[in-house]
Amino acid sequence: MVTALPPKDPTLRAPARGTLAQPAPRFDAQAREWAHDGWDLPEDERLVKREISVERPRSVISWNQSPDLGFDRALNPYRGCEHGCIYCYARPSHAYLGLSPGLDFETRLIARPDAARVLERELGKTGYRVAPLALGSNTDPWQPVEQHYRITRSVLEVLRDWRHPVTITTRGAMVERDLDILSDMAVQGLAEVGVSVTTLDPALARAMEPRAPSPARRLATMRALSDAGVPVRLMMAPLIPGLSDHEAEAILTAAREAGARTAWWAFVRLPGEVAPLFRDWLERVRPGHAVKVMNRVREMRGGRDNDPEFHSRFRGQGPYADMVATRIRVACNRLGFEASLPPLDCSKFRKPPRAGDQLSLF
């Protein structure tokens, strides 16, 4: 478990990034740290640029048995996420690639251009049993790199052709580009979209999520989806106790006005390397809140920075967590949020006809 960050390289220039820290991947036997060479000559500055590698996966559907998740299968078109959200629970997954969960996670990305082709092969297997597929469970499928690779759109095209239900989580405004597919699927009860809104304060959002769309832009995306007939869920996650949780009612109100029909929320989670990265960010960007925020987090996490236990990891425990949950429940009832969206339709799933297929006799 990482408890402290190594010294940062002061020669790096990385504008609009969540962190400059580069904690070593936990599975590496060796670690690199920046150290001054003792000379009084100024070091050359280095501008950190996005690097994209390509992965050719043999399978793209990942499976889970988590009892507190509403899906058992997911697909992520990319590894790493350029949005750079400092609190992202997916950061530790970059360590499995031999990359740092710090700056590497938001600058050294992995694209999976064969994802749609591999997905179609997996859907066509004899033993496959249909259930909603979660798109964007680990990293955002509509992050900036999607503009070039269009992997997410190709995955949606496969799901549409197979009439496979999909549940989506994103904060990327680029999802509007694919409204033609999503609206068609929504009419058939095959698609719903959750849009993440963590704060309405643009300055705080820019600091926490440096390359994600602004809060106002995300609300506009909700409205565009809703107007196109796509069921919209507010993903109010993460709420950060002592920093953004006071906005809960305002976020719920704004999302309801933008067309969200239901709401889901969670407190910030700090697994693995995320905890020291988040603490470092607080001390740099919100020093006046740092002690208060971490004390509230630990109050709800049994004295720890993170609680990995199922059922309590999202909402926390204790009086403060209960108070916030009550506030949100009362606000949802007052605003007329539905308890949940209608279940997606799994009965329409079928292999799409292809040129050259033998026609049915009847």
Image (cartoon, rainbow, N blue to C red):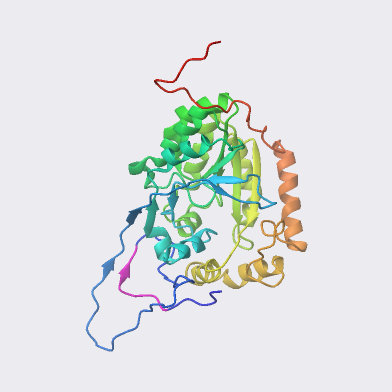
| Quarter where residue 148 is shown | top left
In the rendered image, is residue 228 in sight?
Answer: no
Q: From which residue to which does the magenta span run?
A: 7-14
Q: Is residue 43 above or below residue 104?
A: below
Question: Residue 244 location in percent, x, y?
Answer: 60, 57
Question: Residue 243 location in percent, x, y?
Answer: 59, 61
Q: Is residue 12 magenta?
A: yes
Quadrant of the frame with the N terminus? bottom right
Observer-nearest of 123 and 68: 123
Q: Is residue 299 above or below residue 219?
A: below
Q: Is residue 96 above or below residue 165?
A: below
Q: Residue furthest bottom?
A: 38
Quadrant of the frame with the C terminus? top right
Number of numbered labels in the structure image: 0
In the rendered image, is residue 180 in sight?
Answer: yes
Question: Residue 326 location in percent, x, y?
Answer: 76, 51
Observer-nearest of 37 and 239: 37
Q: Is residue 201 left or right of residue 303?
A: left
Residue at the image position 35 percent from the left and 61 percent from the top: 15
Residue at the image position 71 percent from the left and 69 percent from the top: 299
Residue at the image position 43 percent from the left and 43 percent from the top: 115
Could you tell me what secondary structure mostly forms the magenta stretch? loop
Observer-nearest of 48 and 27: 27
Q: Is residue 201 magenta?
A: no
| Quarter where residue 270 is shown | bottom right
Question: Residue 276 location in percent, x, y?
Answer: 53, 72
Q: Residue furthest top?
A: 362
